[in-house]
Image (cartoon, rainbow, N blue to C red):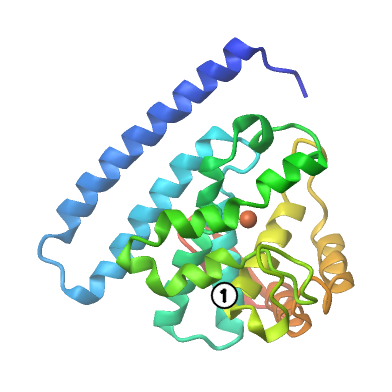
Amino acid sequence: MKKSTKRQVIQKEKEANVVFLKTMKETIFSFDEKANGLNEEQYPTILLESLRAIISSLEEKDPYTHGHSIRVSEYSVLLGRAVGLNERELQELELCSLFHDIGKIGIPDNVLLKPARLSKAEFEIMKSHPVRSAKILEKITAFKNVLPGIKYHHERFDGLGYPEGLKGDAIPLAARIILIADTYDAMTSTRPYRLALDKQVAFDELRKCAGSQFDADLVEKFIHALENQEWRTHGKGLDLIKNIA
Ligand SMILES: [Fe+2]
């Protein structure tokens, strides 16, 4: 990868900020416009559309994570469906997974955008992001139910995760789902330090860490859902095309 100069990086950040502010403005106006004359049941859909737009514009800053939160939310909802969550629970799971990494806003760019593996000290800074995410959102009523899923999305099934080292079923279901969706998307996307892994290689990795890092039952349900059904993504959730098996 060609190394960018400091000036190019600053210019890119400025452009990303402009895109973000423009999207925020458009989103708020369109939300306001669409909200007129809607009944209460339609609010969550419009709100989620608006929030997806805001998250996408935030991720403009880092080309390697662009679209990551949307894809994580799509995979999370897919797994949520596979475990039988109802529509309201699925909407909460989508909200939770869309915003799980919002706390990365508070991580310095030299750590967040480092085009190489993080040092131990840098990783410690990075590890603060789930708590930061929950802190940012705790004052918003709409996020009240989804805060645990956000705060604990890096807990491991064996208790060796962070921030609190929760173990097994003590980890909220949404957090266990997001960890699998998040890891799968990270493995199947190109990162500064490696190319995207093949889908089957990613499945093998998930299975290798089932029971230690991940909830083994959820891993099997996730792989089954992705292997046996064909999905189409358009940034607004995954659409089932057909059952293969
Ligand atoms: Fe995260």
- Tell me: 36 left or right of 230: left
Q: Is residue 15 above or below residue 230?
A: above
| Depth order, front residue of 109/217 | 109
Name the residue at the left extreme. 37
The spot of residue 87 in percent (x, y) is 42, 82
Q: Which residue is mark 1?
A: 174
Is the residue 173 above or below the residue 95 in the image? below
Coordinates of residue 34 in the picture (x, y in percent): 19, 57
> Which residue is located at x 46 percent, y 22 percent?
14
Is the residue marked by circle 1 packed among few (<14), some (14-19), or many (20+) residues within 10 Å? many
Q: Amino acid at mark 1?
A: Ala
Nearest to the observer: residue 151 or residue 55: 151
The number of numbered discs placed on residues in the rendered structure image is 1
Instruction: Say which quadrant the N terminus sits in.
Output: top right
Residue in the image at 39% along x and 27% along y: 18
Which residue shows up at 17% across the image and 52% down it?
32
- Residue 42, x across and y down, in percent: 24, 71
Residue 240 visible in image: no
Residue at screen point 77% across, 41% down: 121
Q: As rendered, which of 196 and 228 lies closer to the eye?
A: 196
Give percent across and percent down for residue 205. 86, 65
In the depicted structure, whether residue 100 falls above or below residue 227: above
Q: Quadrant of ligand 1?
A: bottom right
Of 166 and 87, the residue lying toward us: 166
The relative height of residue 185 versus residue 180 in the rendered view (above or below) is above
Quadrant placement of the C terminus: bottom right
